[in-house]
Amino acid sequence: MTDDDAPGGLPETSLTRLPRAAVLAAADSRLHAGLLGDYLAVLAAAADSGRRLTRAELDQFRALGQVAAESGAPLPALVDLYLSATWRVWPSLPAVRAADRDARADRGGREPRDGTPGGSGGPSGAVSRTRAAASAVLRASDDAVAAVCEGFEAARMARARSEEALRRELVDDLLTGTSAVGQLLERAIAFGLRLEAPHTVLVITGNRRFLDGRALTRSAQELLRAHSLTEPLVATRDGLLVCVLPAHSQLTQPTLPADTGSADTGSASTGSASTGSADAGSAARPGRPPRPTGRRPADEIGPSDRGLGFSPLPAFASPPESGTAVAALAERLRNEPGLIWRMGASRARSGVAGVRIGFEEARSAADLAGRLGLAGTVVHTDDLLIYKVLLRDREALAELVEAVLSPLRAARGGAEPLLETLDAYFSTGAVALAAARRLHLSVRALTYRLDRIHTLTRHNPTSPTDRYVLQTAVLGARLIGWDPSAPAG
């Protein structure tokens, strides 16, 4: 390496003036010899006097470590440069060479050059001076390398904070649309994100906030990067985990592993035959993760999630969008201890506006999944279209819920047991035996509850027309957060 290749910020050096040890060490580590600074001179002074490094010298080595980091030098090679220079310069240090001369003079029976008989104490004097020099050199080397590593790490952390700030600014501008489209496209390319291609936005919410730099956030980014053809963008916003990843076309779509399952596979068996077959077809579609159905087990429901149950989601024939990446991320979230999560996925769109619209879609899907009591599930925005239709006229939906379900509050034990009965009955395709098993009731007790609901609401759950009204009211109660224990107005 020539002196013209020196990184910026190094002291002026010339390879013709550097000691041979520095040149050879630089060749071994493939770094510029100027990264050693005055290291060899410092070692010589320490070996001669036994002193520690001064504050100014330590600051100099910290600065050299920062220069090395900013120039892209790997830390192992930088440490190797200093250690290699240390053992190479050791034999040529003045203190070591003087001790060697004394030792040879003692062995030859001659007086050393200073005229002291026996070499200033004989052989033991030369050995003790060598040991003292070695101790001082090792201590100086330790202090210098520690200072270099400290400067290197400080520069790397500063760079990481700067990149994180730029990433945070990019995410905020993408999701809010506060910057010009051309500037956002250029800034996105710097992070490997090519927004001219279709992208899917994922929004994950949970029972705890997601934070930048945490292990789960880093793991999500690594997983999505491994399963995506181009670079994804992973960041947090308002406690949500936001992922912008490429939506592969049919020509580039990876095959979804056959053994990838849902978090709630057991609940699918409680549904009717028609529901189960529809869900199986949905799970078999390539490129889309299997969609969990049915209710969660009781031990998976958080304190704030207890209450109304929920029927299985309908299956939509949506196009495949980043299936393997979503499935891998869902599996990672399932393995996170104590995390109750929901994931909303948007449609695939191109451009800056597509990311912003996708974020709103995915966040809305995750929010609706929370209202419906779906935990550990991946919910596509198309899966919730029917519920968005219901919420479009919230006032009319609240009026329907109150008119149909408020009479249940007059039942012994309140409305909640009867609402759970309706939910189980609808979720199992109006099969009384399956609903009774889900509720751990006898068929006779279930039939009594259905009759009681008919009496109070004047809607018969076994009638197709009345069943539609009741099921719509039960879904609306979950969507608007209707309180079954509140007194009738």
Image (cartoon, rainbow, N blue to C red):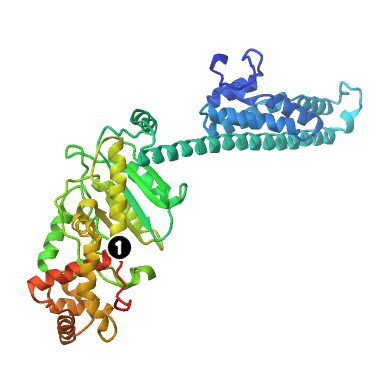
Q: Quadrant of the C terminus?
A: bottom left
Q: In which quarter of the image is residue 110?
A: top right
Give coordinates of residue 264: x percent, y percent: 26, 64
* Horizontal relation, residue 188 to residue 157: left or right: left
Query: Which residue is outermost to the top?
Result: 16
* Pick the front one: 173 or 53: 173
* Pick the front one: 483 or 173: 483
Residue beneath the point at 82% across and 27% down: 102
Give coordinates of residue 479: x percent, y percent: 27, 63
Give coordinates of residue 444: x percent, y percent: 15, 87
Q: In which quarter of the image is residue 384?
A: bottom left
Residue beneath the point at 22% across and 64% down: 397
Query: Which residue is outermost to the left?
Result: 464
Residue named by callout 1: 371
Say if 411 sits above or below 333 in the image: below
* Horizontal relation, residue 37 to residue 119: left or right: left
Q: Is mark 1 on a helix, strand or loop?
A: helix
Residue beneath the point at 22% across and 66% down: 475
Say if 223 sits above or below 463 in the image: above
* Pick the front one: 489 or 193: 489
- Residue count near mark 1 (Cα–Cα under 10 Å), binned few <14, some 14–19, many ≥20: some
Q: Is residue 105 visible?
A: yes
Residue beneath the point at 68% across and 27% down: 39
Say if 222 sits above or below 82 in the image: below
Q: Is residue 84 visible?
A: no
Query: Which residue is outermost to the right?
Result: 116
* Horizontal relation, residue 18 to residue 459: left or right: right
Q: What residue type is labelled 1?
A: Arg
Q: How many labels does the image show?
A: 1
Give coordinates of residue 51: x percent, y percent: 79, 34
* Pick the front one: 60 or 143: 60
